[in-house]
Every structure is written in C-alpha cells, then in structure tokens.
Image (spheres, helix red, strand yellow):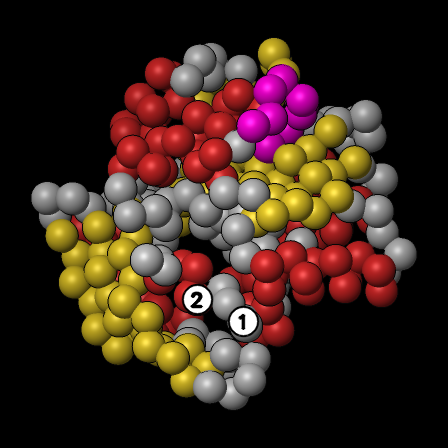
Amino acid sequence: MTQWYEELFKDYAGKYDQEPYTQGTVGECDFIEKEIGRNKKTRILDIGCGTGRHALELARRGYKVVGVDLSESQLRRAKEKAAEQNLQVVFRKRDARKLLFRHEFDLAIMLCEGAFPLMETDEMNFRILQGAAKALKSGGKLIFTTLNGLFPLFHSVKDFLEAEKGESGAACVESSFDLMTFRDRNVTTIVDDHGKTRELRCDERYYVPCEITWLLKTLGFKTIDIYGARLGAFSRADKLTSEDFEMLVIAGK
C-alpha cells in the first residue's frame, strides 16, 4: 500500500522547490556550518534530502555530502540540479527506516520533516532516529526539525497551514488533531508538476520536547538541545514556545 508521503512526493519535485517552507536554505546552512565549526572535513548525511537543497548548498561550500530519500522523483531533480551546478553529491534512494550506515558520518541532518515524523507509527519514526544515530561516528551530531506538539494545543493546524500556503496549490481542506496520539490527520489537495490535482489523506505525528529528549537518550545521545525552528534563521537564541510550529533539535553523541 502506497503511503500518503510517497504519493505526495511523486511528480512534485518542481512544485516542492516553490513551496514557501523550502526558501530558507541558505540561512539554515549558515547555522549548520556554525554548529560544525566550519570544519570542511565534516562528512554529512542528509536524510530525506528531497530535491537536495541543503545537500547541494553544503556541497557548494566545500563539504562532502550523501543525500538519501525514498522518492525517485525528488532524487531525479536533485541529481539534475547537481549536474546543472557542477556539484558533487552522492544521492541514493534509501528508506530512512532501514539505513545501513554504520559510524560513517560526523553530522546527520533531517530538515523540513525529512522522513521524521511522517511515518504511520511511532515505531517507524523511532527507527529513523535509530538509523541516524548508528550512522554517526562517536562525537557526531544530529540536527533535525520536527513538528512541535505544543503548537496544536493552542492553535488550529488547519488555519496555520492555510495562512502559510504558497502558490504551489497545496491546501489543507480538513484537519483533526488527536490528543491521545498527538497525530494530525488532514486532507490536503496539491497540484503536481503535471498540473493534476490530487487529494492526500495525511497523518503526521507531533512531538513534545520531553518525548524527543527521551527517544534520543535511549539512542545514546549525550547532549540534547531543543529550540524554536524559524524558517531560514535557525538559532540557539530562540527558546521553544507554543507559538513555534516546528522545533529545532541538536543532539550530540
């Protein structure tokens, strides 16, 4: 059975690059560079790399990057952009729940809900974190963003998505947040790269900070810092609040 996130990213690479939430790449990579001390020897794994926007920007700055994603369409566009820009990035089709990397990377990133937390069960989401942890060397760092469970306690997710939609045609037409599971189940319509309108029944998991902290501690991370995630302007100065739709997580092995 094809899941909603697989259906979403089929024939959506062009429209994805136009989404408002994909426009903060340069600022986000500035933050990543600062976190790794601009050490060009840092080997980076981009999980759920999509069309390669972070991977390509980091490669442009001189880092060695491997990008993995489940979507052939997204990866095809990533490779096209790499060729157009004459950048060397290894892009591979991989399921983030089944990563086989072992102690190979100094940094792993999962930004803009790259795989986590889109899975249909909590166990699957955990396997993504587990794969990222195993991919890191001792002393490695994991930087990712995820949906902030504090937000829907005070706000309507549907209203937020409606306000944030861009010209891509994606629109949330129905939304229901479950307090027992912290899952938002919504119906979203998109217009794909071929101009076809499709309706998706999405199921996304929101996490509260203490859950993320506990999950990462079980995977051996020694330091776990959580902040508000501001598009294109990640900062350790931004305390997480109920006003932040996403949280920024920085964990060290």
Q: Nearer the viewer, residue 221 or 92?
A: 92
Task: State left or right for residue 202 relative to residue 19.
Answer: left
Q: Which residue is mark 1?
A: 12
The verdict on residue 90 being magenta is no
Q: Of helix, strand and loop, which one carries label 2? A: helix
* Residue beneath the point at 60% across and 64% down: 73
Residue at the spot x=75%, y=27% of the render?
42
> Is 103 part of what is drawn in magenta?
yes
The alpha-carbon separation of the residues under discs 2 and 1 comes to: 7 Å
Task: Specify start and end residues of the magenta stretch as a single range.
Answer: 100-108
Q: What amino acid is labelled 2 in the image?
A: Leu
Residue matched to label 2: 8
Determine whether 70 is above or below 2 in the image: above
The N terminus - image quarter: bottom left
Residue 237 point in image, percent of width and height: 51, 37
Within 10 Å of disc 1 (Cα), the crowding (few <14, some 14-19, many 20+) is many
